[in-house]
Image: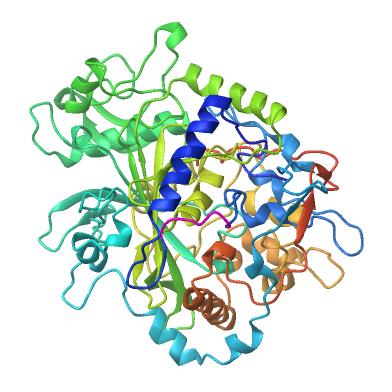
Amino acid sequence: MSNSLIPASRPAAAATLLATLVIACLLGACERRDDSGVTLRSKPDVSRIANIPPQCYTRTRDADGKVQNPCYVCHADAQEPNYQSQPENQLSYAFPSLQRDGKTPNTWANFFVDRGAAIAAIGDDEALRHVRTDNYRDARGRIELVERLTHLPKAWDVNGDGRWGGYLPDAAFRFDAQGFDRDANDRPTGWRAFAYFPFPGSFMPTNGAFDDVLIRLPAAFREREDGTPDETVYKINLAIVESLVRRADIAIDASDERALGSDLDRDGRLAKATRIVYDWAPLQKRFMSYVGRARLEQDAGRLHAAAGLFPEGTEFLHSVRYLDVAADGSVVPAPRMKELRYSRKLRWVSYSALRNQAIIETKEAALSPDEPEQYFGDPERGMQSKLGWAYQGFIEDARGRLRPQTQEESQFCLGCHGGLSATDDTVFSFSRKLQGGTARGWYHWDAQPFRALPDPLRADGQPEFATYLYNNAAGDEYRANDEVRTRFFAADGTPRADAFEKLKTDLSTLMLPSRERALALDKAYWLIVREQSFAHGRDAILRPAHNMWQEVEQNAPTGIETPLPAPRLAVQ
């Protein structure tokens, strides 16, 4: 099993030499530290393959010889313009060989550390006080990280120009009923939150973290043709983007097509529309266009629209949070952030360019299978993917304050967002957005996330999370979540029919851990924060991982003989 970049793309000889020289210069030039003692630049002795996530080191065969398959959700057939179809990666560990014996060491050492005694030494009340402390805003309500970035520590000033050149956090995390983020003066920030089905596996809250995702389109999408801000125009443009990314019709509030100057429902007349009709077939001369000033920019060739792709300038903001426990004992998102992740689409990449990139990667993987992936960018301005996006992250320092991620910590992000079959234009969440219920999915998670939310159906009609449980016999890739295993399977591995029946209509039975497990996971992660050992793994692990290889022989078979499909979610 491998990640999106294994087989990895390998730069041509000249590009490799240039990248090596540039990175070597930067590594030697930036050994300064911030006030928490963290060097933002990776040192030469750290892992060169931090883009291969720990999930890819999963030992798929159980002690009794039975083979489980958590790999299919990431590595399967993709839908164009995602040309990263990779079902064969379910079958073998196609890693670069970093040792003469043909093996690749697993550098995610935190998975093998026994922190049981340290976890037990932290009291529940102490853990709750910690996770309930807001580390995004200070006591005066200001974004604390902005204050630190404005008075930039020298160790964070990678290019030495005296100012922060990357994303400056600007979301207020104050949402109205339609999911729009508004600042303290009730002004829109442009960010809009949406609820979505978590990706199956380690990213489910039962494995240690809640998260949320916000999207923001450039100003042109939020304005009428004359440049006047208009929330209706913004809503329609977001729906058009959703229709293009999902390749499906999208329901909208009744909207006046005459005021927008666009036949949104493609019925041949301008009237009231209640849906965006997906109708993009360039070979048949059928195209889709935005509304408002974005349409003018599109007509001028400065903005683009295509199925499966976001327009240039699209931004995503993703906060990863600890688990809190409400008064009724239910598990809810905590105020404290573990991470704040940001991405922005820097440039438009056409279908043909995306296809050519995939061909180049396949060729370079065959020619240089042991050459680790090379990345451009830095912790200040973000790491860049070959698909046109920049990714940047902030993570807790030892005192719990958010700080920029190091180069290696940022490279970790590109492993999954650099091109998996499971993504649309490198993004996981948007095509998994809820469509029914409250504001058609445009809202921020409330105090009771997942309650009465059904197990979503895939395009083949199968329930997604029940299928994952059946295929993996566990609630995570490492098969370390004993609570989920006990809830859904008997001691002999037989599925519990009553549990799977409840899952059909209530995802919380899978997604939400018990109070005891939630607090233990919080404590386990807090220990990693104190150590600042993210380079060795940032998953909250309650005991050493037994279903994980400490080293992998290149191209060794996983034991999976037939790749499983991972169809997209059906439009609900």
Magenta-colored stretch includes residue 43: yes
Q: Residue at x 41, y 79 (%)?
A: 131
Residue 315 percent coordinates (x, y): 33, 43
The span shown in magenta is 40-45
Q: Horizontal and vertical percent for residue 278?
A: 41, 24
Q: Is residue 90 left or right of residue 75?
A: right
In the foreground, 367 or 53: 367
Q: Magenta stretch: dominant SS?
A: loop
Residue in the picture at 75% in, 62% down: 548
Display colour scheme? rainbow
The x and y percentages for residue 449 are 45, 65
In magenta stretch: residue 357: no
User: Which of the 4 quarters of the picture holds residue 265?
Assistant: top left
Task: Return the residue nearer the eye: 338 or 470.
Answer: 338
- Whether residue 246 appears in this view of the structure is yes
Return the x and y of residue 239 as percentages of the image width and height: 33, 35
Which residue ends up furthest to the right in the rendered image? Answer: 64
* Residue 288, quarter of picture: top left
149 or 118: nearer the eye? 149
Residue at the spot 41% in from the left edge and 28% down from the top edge: 244
Question: Is 270 rendered above or below residue 85?
Answer: above
In the depicted structure, whether residue 402 falls above or below residue 352 = below
Can residue 12 be seen here? no
